[in-house]
Amino acid sequence: MIMDELLEILQDVNDDVDFENCETLIDDGILDSFAILQIIAALSENYDISIPAAEIIPENFNSAKALLKMVERLQNE
């Protein structure tokens, strides 16, 4: 399942975060800019997508669900 795979990727970036339940990763400062860059690199590599700068906004990175929606949208483009 793609969500399980995504959660595994996110845990590799920061295993101290509850990615499965947290919906304020950016708003609450849980992820810093370095973690965001790591996530972008991992998603690009694992899902063979390119994440344009316009997509790097808090609403796409606040939760695993939001990240999944962005990945699926970019895969379909």
Image (spheres, grey):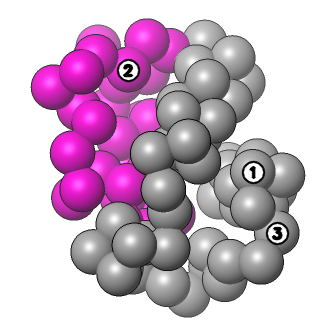
Left or right: 72 as drawn, with respect to 54: right
Tell me whether the residue at label 1 lies in contact with that at label 2, contact meaning CB atoms closer than 8 angstroms. Answer: no
How far apart are the alpha carbons under marks 2 and 3? 23 Å
Q: Is residue 20 magenta?
A: no
* Residue 51 marker: 2
In-front residue for pair 45/69: 45
- Structural crowding at the residue carrying mark 3, measured as other residues with C-alpha within 10 Å and reported as few (<14), some (14–19) or many (≥20): few
Left or right: 69 as drawn, with respect to 3: left
Residue 36 at x, y percent in the picture: 50, 44
The residue depicted at 27 percent of the width and 36 percent of the height is 56
Left or right: 44 as drawn, with respect to 42: left
In-front residue for pair 47/38: 38
Q: Secondary structure at mark 3?
A: loop
| Residue most extreme to the left | 54
Residue 38 at x, y percent in the picture: 63, 35
Three-letter amino acid code at the position of disc 1: Val
* Residue 15 marker: 3
Residue 45 at x, y percent in the picture: 69, 17
Residue 55 at x, y percent in the picture: 23, 32
